[in-house]
Image (tube, coloured by chain):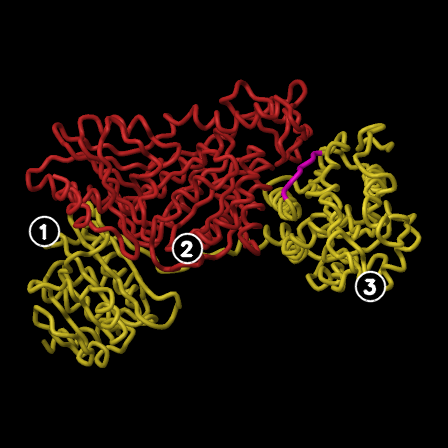
Chain colours: A red, B yellow
Amino acid sequence: MSTRQAEMQRVSRQLVSGNRMVALGAVAAGCRFFSGYPITPSSEIYQTMMEELPRPENAGLALAAPDEISALAYCVGASMSGHKAMTATSGPGWCLMIETLQYALMTETPVVIAVVQRLGPSTGGATQGAQGDVLLTQFCTSGGYTIPVFAPSNARESFELTQAAFWWAERLRTPVVLLSDKEVGMTLESVNVNALDRRPVPERAAFSGIGRYVPYACEGMEEPPLFAPVGGKVKVVATGSAHDREGKLRKNSPEVIELLVHLQAKIAAHAGAMAIYEMDLQEGAETLVVSYGITARAAREAVHRVRATGGKISFLKLMTLFPVATAAIEQAAEGCRRVVVAEENLTGLYASAIQPLPGGCELLRVNGIGNQISPGQILEATERAR
Amino acid sequence: MSTSFLVQDAQLPYCKGCGHGLVLRAFGEALESLHLPPAEVAVVTDIGCVGLADALFATPHTVHTTHGRSTAFATGLALADSVLGGARLKPVVMIGDGGAMIGINHLVNAALLNADVTVLVHNNFLFGMTGGQNSAFSPEEFITATTPAGNAVPPLDLAQVLLASRASFVARKITSDRDLSEVIARAIVHPGFAVVEILELCTGFATKWNPLTGAQLKQVAEKAGYELGVMREEKRQTFGAGYKIRSKEVRTRGGQEKTPAKPFVATMQTAQRLVIAGTAGERVQTAATMLGQAAMHCGLHVTQKNDYPVTQGTGFSVSEVILSPEEIFFTGIEEPDAVLVLSGDGAKELERTGVLARVTEETLVLADTDVHLPELPCTIQRFPFRTATGPKNAALAAVAQWLDMTAALPMEVLWFALEERFPKEAESTRASIGKILQTV
């Protein structure tokens, strides 16, 4: 066998979309339940799950919901029975899901929602990309609770970050958003499927069955309560109303307030561990380019071009958007004079979420809607600043 | 309250004479009579006074949900249990008339699916917890906090809506019916979706403002044209049972990728960026994918970005394909290496989105003979793609022509990709495209 033939066997490239990789990543993570409602540009996730989950090896359930509210509610019900569950949507559907997302947050029910962004507001542009929902996924709860958000920039990351989304949803018993966009979701690209990182997600920590089950009791503020399924042997009390450890509605009780604080504390305590990013720093660089999702690819290209002409520049691609990877941003910005944040929305939504920048760095925003941000636009901003 | 399912001697959180207490007792008796293991019962409550019932259940699971959505959560529980679990769980929804209306879509879908969910609709004709506002179920002339001069809108007949939604068990009862618990028990054991609407009094508001007593509920029903009793009780396959049978029949769509006997080798050394533009439904994206597959067989990296209008089968269709020996970062195309234009729809879109403005002297532009294009910095090379090969093969013909002129990839690998995608038509397609290539 020639070296080239051996190489071809090792590398098995397939032309796949980010959407398809979200679905396959979910299956690899152990997702057993999917309910969907069609919406461009996320429909392929739904269609792929309808094909994949019923297969004997996956032994899952995928079905059509009559609307996005039902789609997420069905998932929450399935998750309460102990099954890993996911749905997928885009901006208009996401808006409808927010009520149920908050219910999942309050009842500490793991669920993954893939949001494939399109141009908004309202029904906006169905077949146009955008990164305009980044703060809508984050600040959608009463109380401003941190929803973990992972953002892939390509098909491979769509696969891997979907698994990460399941991992953290189950680990912390919380809803998690996988934030893709039309360009990442619908663009086909070659992926070496043999090199994908497959990580089945362990089952959520469950009640041992010994002693009395207290549904919302947890070990300290930073750990989720132990899980017992609705329909299992021990009685479960679940509620979306402010409750004590027993799940009883209480008003003005310190225990209830403590549990509300716990919902945030369990996310905040794991922020460091949740941070996924790619850091490519250059000694002596005065400019750091920060980006995520589809725009991170243009940013990477811009950085590549700067370096090709002998310039020095650092790059940080964030794959965990929330909780904000503060330590990574601090490390990357150290010694820099300016930070360029590139994203495809009107006002620099994510840039506003990571301010103030460490070390008094100047913030430069590269924004725009209607087209992918190009490497040229990012280069222009970095050159203007020099 | 004297069933093992309910908390003994519980203080009910309801006004004196409220129908909720009567329904609760009947529900408790029904559970008792069925001898169900409490762990196989999940009481799913909605918002409103009815949603205060959770704490009154001693042994079954309780899930207190959001307004109107209780049926949807219960449906998720039931579906997961029926397919992924032991198919033993009995979710029972307790919902009011307000919740039934805001969540009517969930009731309709649970009925259509025939999910194994029982819904007890506590219809007291108004919103009690929030101060007695009218609901979609308020009778005509009913006085409520928001209809001080009498309700002018006729009430919804939920049972008819759910009958039309193929619900397999539908009943409407009055709290004072002596067989209420028996009907609730029948609904719970019914394999599939069951709804029992129960007409009851809100003594906090309804009876204060309206001359209404328990004895008059029957007249209210008559005046509204409501049928009483069990209206339907029939066996129909549940979604879960049907799913298990059908899931064996799922097939994957699309062609089969093959491994070439020996690997193809690309001659191109640097990235090639192509824009292919034509009309939707004419296999523009398919041709781009075949080129991508061909490049992958040569070990190249590929991205394919498609654009089309909101409509599916009309208007333009544009694919941007990048082939590269290196990893591809930016998936857009700033300056195209080649532009293939197959139709007027495609040409107009390229002009509108500024692609043609980014064409340089170096760009290879191949266009169908009849397509109008503005003046460009490079020569436009014309070929009879559409007439020679038909509109559906024009894009692939242009791709073949581009390969023929640039030798970026061996032509054989494109034919290999064509064979993978369309094994039946591959030979004839290749022959018709071959004629164009020979004429140049």
Q: Distance between the residues labelled 3 and 2?
A: 43 Å
Q: How crowded is mark 3: few (under 14 residues within 10 Å), some or many (20 or more)?
A: some
How far across and how far down the image is residue B43, in percent?
Answer: 72, 39
Task: State the extent of the magenta-drawn residues as a range.
Answer: B61-66
Residue A121's label in the rendered image is: 2
Classify mark 3: helix, strand or loop.
loop
Please name whichever residue, B251 or A279, is drawn nearer the observer in this view of the structure: A279
Please name whichever residue, A88 or A194, is drawn nearer the observer in this view of the structure: A88
How far across and how far down the image is residue A220, in percent?
Answer: 53, 18
Which amino acid does the dot numbered 1 rest on? Gln
Q: Answer with left or right where residue B108 lies relative to residue A364.
A: right
Instruction: Determine whether label 3 and label 2 are within 8 Å by CB.
Output: no
Q: How far apart are marks 3 and 1 (CA)?
A: 79 Å
**Residue located 49% across and 48% down the image:** A55
Question: Circle 2 marks a residue in which chain?
Answer: A
Quadrant in which residue B305 is drawn: bottom left
Instruction: Determine whether label 3 and label 1 are within 8 Å by CB.
Output: no
Q: Would residue A265 be seen by someone viewing this image from the given angle?
A: yes
Q: Name the residue under label 3.
A: B224
Q: Would residue A3 be seen by someone viewing this image from the given angle?
A: no
Are labels 2 and 1 assigned to the same chain?
no
Compared to residue B406, the image places residue B439 above or below, namely below
Which secondary structure dominates the residues rendered in magenta?
A: strand
Q: Mark 1 points at which residue?
A: B269
Sequence-earlier tag: 3 or 1? 3
Classify mark 2: helix, strand or loop.
loop
Q: How crowded is mark 2: few (under 14 residues within 10 Å), some or many (20 or more)?
A: few
Question: Circle 1 marks a residue in which chain?
Answer: B
